Amino acid sequence: MSARPHDGGFCARRRNCITGLATLALAGAMPAAFAQQASTNFPNRVVRIIPFGTAGGPIDVIARVYADKLQQRWGQSVIVEPKPGASGIIASDAVAKAPPDGHTVLFTLPLTHINNAILQPKLPYDPVKDFEPISQLASGGPMLVARADAPYSNLKEFVAYAKAHPGLTYGTWGNGSQAHLMGELLKRQSGLSLTHVAYKSESAAHNDMIGGMLDFAWANPSTARVQSQAGKMKVIGIAGSRRVSTLPNVPTFADQGFAGFDLDSWIGVYAPAKTPPAVIEQWNQALREITRMPEVQSRLVAFGFEPLGNTPAQFRASYQADFPRVAELIKAAGVTAE
């Protein structure tokens, strides 16, 4: 007679176990199901691209080129929404805290994820844990520029002039930016007395330089080409690993006998952490195909960038290789957060 309660208890426990196992199995299947559903439904509403810098800046313009192609491809509205300020921290933080569904991504430079990570002790985001890398679209280097009437035309002449006129000021698009690092490295290597002035945008620095409030500045190759052709500035050299096709006569720093300036910048695209892999893959495939389009490549080249369009794994590997080099450069240049 005692068997019945025992059997009943066993059966009840067995039913509970089966129910529990089924629940666990269902829970285990949910992430995969969510990822599949996210992939199937993506995009199902407006897609936002948040670019580094101000409206009309180089990354904003490039982001709009991609937004137009993505909108044609997906049949969904793709808007570009700049959030300038704080050396890209505001834009990056907005994406880090966005829903991880692929509908908000960041178009940015190394400043937000490498330079700021080294220089800023309390970022509101973690450059690694809070983002999923999607693709590096292109790479390039900044150019040192001066007013058209500057009494020097190459790097050696510039150094000689700067030594004879200590205290020259120069502008960049942010503290700790690639241009800032190159300026401080040049200062240290050549024994110059230079003062860095950080601006919210490249154009603001150029306006002050042309207006006589700055002695020299840094520029992306597209701006340098347009402004030099307009007779407003001259290009002294490019701090990067190669010359650019739109300004083939502008030598690199290495061409002019100055070593250590071959660390290229890049344009990278990130999604919030925990964005489903299937959505990341959709983004990556779309960006890589768009980057291969001749009209898009010509726009990137016009800005002085070499088109890339790599995979998330390649982007991650590139980031890991760049990080120690930038850290070493920051140390050598003596750049600090302020």
Image (cartoon, rainbow, N blue to C red):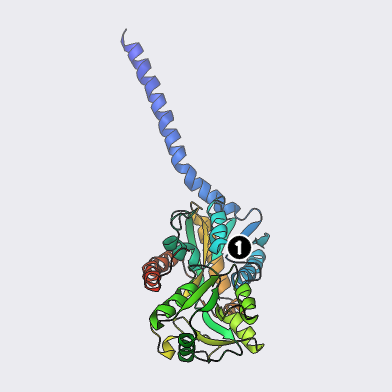
Which residue is the extreme one toward the left? 2
Q: Where is residue 185 in the image (x, y as percent from the top left)?
A: 42, 77
Quadrant assignment, res 313: bottom left
Q: In this view, does 181 lie to the left or right of 228?
A: left
Label count reads 1
* Depth order, front residue of 76/103: 103
Q: Where is residue 118 in the image (x, y as percent from the top left)?
A: 42, 62
Q: Is residue 61 left or right of residue 191?
A: right
Q: Is 272 above or below relative to 141? A: above
Residue 29 in view in this figure? yes
* Depth order, front residue of 27/77: 77
Q: Is 135 above or below relative to 222? A: above
Q: Is 262 above or below relative to 134? A: below
Q: Residue at x 66, y 56 (%)?
A: 46
Residue 302 in view in this figure? no
Residue corresponding to mark 1: 84
* Depth order, front residue of 178/303: 178
Under tag 1, what secondary structure? loop
Q: Position of residue 84 (x, y in %)?
A: 61, 62
Q: In this view, does 155 lie to the left or right of 150?
A: left
Q: Where is residue 128 in the image (x, y as percent from the top left)?
A: 43, 57
For the N terminus, the image quarter is top left
* Depth order, front residue of 292/109: 109
Q: What amino acid does circle 1 point to?
A: Pro
Which residue is the extreme one toward the top? 1
Dot 1 alpha-carbon crowd within 10 angstroms: few under 14, some 14 to 19, many 20 or more: some
Q: Which residue is drawn at 63% across and 81% down?
A: 212
Q: Which residue is drawn at 37% across and 24% down?
A: 14
Q: Residue at x 48, y 61 (%)?
A: 133
